[in-house]
Amino acid sequence: MLSNKHFITAMLVAPVLAILGYFAVDFAVSEEPETAREGGQYKLAAASNCRYESGLCTLSNGNFELRIQISENQAGDTVLHLKSEFPLEGVRAAWVQDDENGEQPSALSNLDDDRQQWTLPLNKAPSTDAELRLVAKAQGALYYGETTTGFIEYQTSFGKDFR
């Protein structure tokens, strides 16, 4: 079997063709990334940490990323914290229990001069079956997204807080 020159040639050529085919298909069907334009609207995708009891949720589109955390301050009030890599012009958030019954969006307050940290005091802690809808404006473009609020509760099986 190993003396057959056709078999040996096929064993050498097949991996090369597979690798070339992989890159050719990627080149043929991949989309070119585009930069955000002023006045454009871009959807944010929820990362996997938004689905689990991680205490943190990340919404992103390309290199634009928003990190959301809900915690209690020293006074015992529930507060939504948002951190961005880019300066934001404004942020609004709304909690929706079901599609017909939602709150009016509330504007988040800026915490620092570089406009990358925002906060919103909440009347009560939202339930874990609600949805968070968020809109952020940066460089004239709108970024919007929604996620479930299962991430609110931070739990670990080790009994230790790793945050």
Image (cartoon, grey):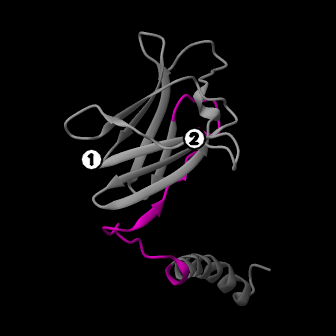
Name the amino acid type tagged 1.
Pro
Mark 2 or mark 1: which comes first in sequence?
1
Q: Disc 2 residue type?
A: Glu
Image depth: mark 2 or mark 1 in front? 2
Q: Nearer the viewer, residue 34 or 120?
A: 120
Quadrant in the picture for residue 117:
top left
Relative to residue 73, is residue 148 drawn left or right? right
Q: Is residue 163 visible?
A: no
- Magenta includes 32? yes
Q: Which mark is residue 87?
A: 1
Task: State whether residue 123 is above or below residue 102.
Answer: above
Residue at the outermost top position: 75
**Is residue 126 something that shows in the picture?**
yes
Spatial CA span between label 2 and label 1: 26 Å
146 or 163, nearer to the observer: 146
> x%, y% of residue 32?
43, 76
Residue at (57% x, 40% y) in the render: 103
Q: Residue furthest bottom?
A: 6
Task: Classify mark 1: helix, strand or loop.
Answer: loop
Residue 135, given in percent of the width and then of the height, sits at 45, 51
Give the structural element (helix, strand or loop) at label 2: loop
* Residue under label 2: 103
Q: For the residue carrying disc 1, how many other residues have a C-alpha within 10 Å: few (<14), some (14-19), or many (20+)? A: some
User: Which residue occupies 59% across, 81% down?
Assistant: 21
Q: Which quadrant of the view contains residue 33?
A: bottom left
Residue 1 vertical placement versus 41 (above, below): below
Report the span colored magenta.
27-56
Question: Magenta stretch: dominant SS?
Answer: loop
